[in-house]
Amino acid sequence: MTFTCRQCGSCCMYLGDYIIIDHQIGPFEFVCESVSTGTQFTAHIDEDKREIFCDRTFPEEHPHACRFLRPEGNLLRCTIHIDSPAQCKFYRCVIMRISDPVGNHRGSVTGTLNLHSEDTVLRTIWESAEKNIPESLPDVEERRKVYLTEHGYRVN
């Protein structure tokens, strides 16, 4: 299954220390460094995100977030998506970590709502969740969290 980013921004909220802007070389062009690899790259602000990039409120309020992350409606968007470094392009988020009642890690869920677990009981519960979750909660992710909690798992 293809990974689809939900644009929640969770992965980028603490990347301010990993992507450093060395200097600006144009109105929407920056020389940057990927600290984890020591690699320099040039970041161009995506044309369709230049307006939101100009608002500096978000990076001032969130000093540890990536300098290129900006809100747009209910989404948090990468404004250099085309030029983002490899660490960003290859990242696949985990939106849910599942533990047993005593706190042992039993599985994780990615942004595509795929469960990654060797726990056969958890897998069975996950697979049965879709047909057994009450529709009173509109969000599928929240309904699954409630269902797992009802079956004794901790979800965060």
Image (tube, rainbow, N blue to C red):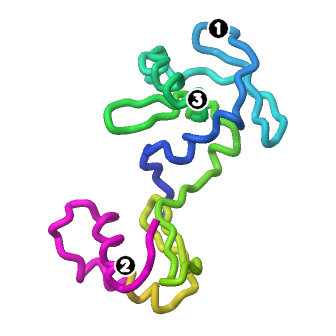
Q: Nearer the viewer, mark 1 or mark 3?
A: 3
The amino acid type found where label 2 is placed reads Leu
Location of residue 139 by image quarter: bottom left
Spot occupied by residue 64 in the image (x, y as percentages of width and height): 60, 34
**Stretch of the chain drawn in magenta:** 127-156
Q: Residue under circle 1?
A: 26
Spot occupied by residue 48 in the image (x, y as percentages of width and height): 44, 23
Picture layout, residue 94 above or below residue 84:
below
The amino acid type found where label 3 is placed reads Pro
Element type at mark 3: loop
Q: Residue under circle 2?
A: 148
User: Does residue 50 appear in the picture of this structure?
Assistant: no
Residue under the image location 70 percent in, 22 percent down:
21
Q: Nearer the viewer, mark 2 or mark 1?
A: 2
From mark 3 to mark 2, how far is it between C-alphas? 35 Å
Element type at mark 2: helix
The amino acid type found where label 1 is placed reads Gly
10 lies left or right of 152: right
Asked if marks 3 and 2 touch (Cβ < 8 Å), the reply is no
Rate crowding at label 3 as few (under 14), some (14 to 19) or many (20 or more) other CA atoms within 10 Å: some
Q: Residue under circle 3?
A: 63
